[in-house]
Amino acid sequence: MLPGTADQAPVVGKTFRKDMTIAQALAAHPKATEVFTRFHLGGCAHCPDNEIETIEPVCQEYNIDVEEFLGALEALMSE
């Protein structure tokens, strides 16, 4: 891999990514809404912007560690 391209490489085995929309994340697993609620983002499921807003800026806006949030979402896949 060329230097500086690490962010562009696909992450194998990961369902949730910081660049996916909230709607995509919510559709990826039936219990994803529980994770959003646990991180005090319960309104995301009903927000009209969930089709365009992505995970990373929403986490930044609410001072949520994006990697922790993604880890909680990813943990759903092993349930």
Image (spheres, grey):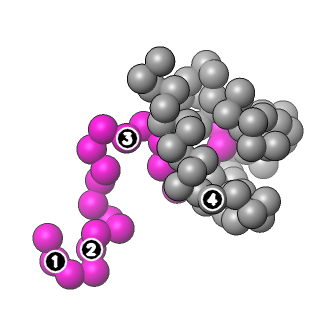
How many labels, in total? 4
Disc number for residue 14: 3
Which residues are the magenta region? 1-23
Q: Is residue 54 left or right of residue 78?
A: right
Q: Which residue is mark 1?
A: 2
Foreground label between 4 and 2: 4
Q: Residue at x 63, y 22 (%)?
A: 31
- Amino acid at circle 4: Asp
The amino acid beneath tag 2 is: Thr
Crowd rating for badge 3 (residues with CA inside 10 Å; few <14, some 14–19, many 20+): few
SS at badge 1: loop
Would you say the residues marked 1 and 3 are in contact, meaning their CB atoms lie under 8 Å apart? no
Foreground pick, 49 / 58: 58
Nearer to me, 66 or 29: 66
Q: Residue at x 63, y 59 (%)?
A: 65
Residue 15 visible in the picture? yes
- Pointers 2 and 1 in contact (CB under 8 A)? yes
Badge 4 or badge 2: first in the primary sequence: 2
Q: Residue at x 56, y 38 (%)?
A: 72
Please name the amino acid that badge 3 sits on: Lys
Q: Earlier in the sequence, mark 2 or mark 3?
A: 2
- When the figure is inspected, residue 12 is found, relative to residue 54, above or below; the finding is above
The amino acid type found where label 1 is placed reads Leu
Please name the residue shown 57% across and 51% down the image: 68
Compared with 67, 39 (above or below) is above
Residue 38 location (% of width, % of height):
75, 36
Q: Secondary structure at mark 3?
A: loop
Report the Cα–Cα distance between label 4 and label 2: 23 Å
Provide the residue designation for mark 4. 65
